[in-house]
Amino acid sequence: MSLLKVENLSVVDLRNGERILHNLNFSLEPNSCLAIVGESGSGKSMTCKAILNLTNPWLEVTGTVFLHGKEIKKNDFGVMRKIRGKNISMILQDAMTAFDPLYTIGYQIEETLCENLKVSKKDAKAMGIEAMNKMSIYDAKDVLKKYPHQLSGGMLQRCMIAIAMAMKPDIIIADEPTTALDSINQRDVVEQFERLQRITSTAILFISHDLGVVQRLAQKVLVMKGGACVEYGNANQIFREPKNDYTRYLVETRIALSQPFHKIMNREEVEVIDVKSAGCI
Amino acid sequence: MLKVQDVYKSYSKSGSLFRRDQIHVLSGISFGIEEGECVGLIGESGSGKSTLSRLIMDLEKPDKGLITLEDESIQVWKKKNQGQISVVFQDYTSSVNPRFTVEQVITEPIMLKGKQAHIKTKAMQLLDRVSLSSQLLTRYPHELSGGQLQRVCIARAISTKPRFVILDEAISSLDVSIQAQILELLKELKTDLNLTYLFIAHDLQAVASLCDKVLFLYKGKIEERLPVTELARTENEYAKKLLSSVIAFEA
């Protein structure tokens, strides 16, 4: 049985009747990673907002979402609140604006954990530190005392993943978590997600337009264009032999961008080996 | 063409009057860019990349050190060669006036220089240069997509026929597929208009596909400089770390 199953998810803008999402169908298995890829404006973020019913009031969401085989009743606010955070946590793209600048990181972690897990402040702090250690933040106690502006984007992003992990959710939805980071931080965050998959059974819904990252993390891929699904299936298969023209276009542009870099790195490696073997002779 | 010699820049911490509380953003930066070259400047956020670009454009003055263009100080050079240095920023939405139409955005620098004949045809030629249709002339910035708007910004940057263009994270906030297109456009413009680029970025893959030379900026110092083809041979720790952390797509 799938952990999360989405059937015929559609979103319509009631103000002008425009359809933003067209009948999306996909499912997420336990301990796996599904990536949603596409260009900006293709409806990736809208999809996860629609799952959690976080859409603006003028958008009408239709279709059904099953969690553990049970339908989520969208209009029941109590149920929805329990699901958000406890069953499904979300990591946002811009860590800098996702935290409240007026409070310390520690306060915000405690608040989140106290509210959602109903634990005492002391326990919440301990859990926060533990989760941050897992995220390889080793000076967690200092970090807890800091305000968001005192930390780098990568650090904040890791704090956010730490909070999401501390809640021990069934599903983590990560909306472009690596886009705003430089490559060292990006690598760090991707490694944390890999760890997360290894040590917990949490499933990840990963949204990104960076196919390199997606290739490393995801087992399944959903390619979106203009609010509709154009291809859905096994990640390796889609990247190796894309059936759809649009997917092929995405893959090709990615390759075109990486190729000079690959060439430089690989050619040098070859030359280095040549020099070495020449030395042996 | 451009020479940066031993430049220092520090800002005082907000709310402090004491000298010792200063944050040293750049310390002892020296490098040169030859005519027709494209130099990539790589560094993580907060390493001083944007500060350096502001110093080069003479929007701020360095505390110590000298920045010269063609052996003249930047202020003198700018007076003599009006509009020959221009810049494209990362954030395309905040770098255009939302009340201007695309035509006004593109022609503003030309108007400032005082040439006013055939302004509309010029704007159309510029749009054509960056592969946009001339129908966009009457549109407003919010009606364009990110890639289109960044193209408009590039058109604006080349409207005064510059020789030196600073690209400050110009492609970082675009989709990967659009990034590839903009990089192609930049390459084309470079050869056609004989431009010299300073390409500031944090994405090594983009730098590798556009630049001839790479500078690694880390904590206000240039840690490593080398031609792009020698990237794999770097001995520097920071550069190595950065190179090994690139998550490349493999076909």
Image (cartoon, coloured by chain):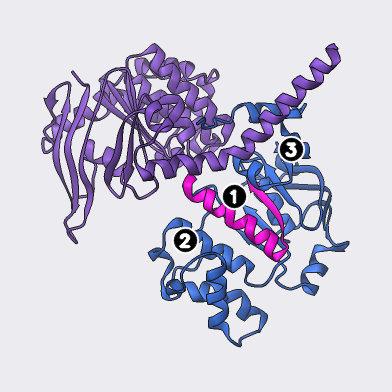
Chain colours: A purple, B blue
> Residue visible at 58% across and 86% down?
B118
Q: Earlier in the sequence, mark 1 or mark 3?
A: 1
Q: Nearer the viewer, mark 1 or mark 2?
A: 2
Amino acid tagged 1: Glu
Tag 2 subunit? B
Q: Secondary structure at mark 3?
A: helix
Give the CA separation, mark 2 to mark 3. 31 Å
Q: Which residue is mark 1?
A: B169
Q: Where's the C terminus of chain A, which quadrant?
A: top right
Q: Which residue is mark 2?
A: B148
Residues under labels 1 and 2: Cα distance?
A: 16 Å
Q: How many numbered discs, if any?
A: 3
Q: Quadrant of residue A17?
A: bottom left
Mark 1, Cα crowd under 10 Å, few <14 / some 14-19 / many 20+, is many
**Residue at figure coordinates x 47%, y 20% from the top left:** A135
In the displayed structure, B104 sits above or below A74; it is below
Callouts 2 and 3 on one subunit: yes
Report which residue position mark 3 lands on: B229
Depth order, front residue of A115/A240:
A240
Lateral position of residue B82 relative to residue B13, left or right: right
Residue drawn at (44%, 37%), measured in percent from left and top?
Answer: A95
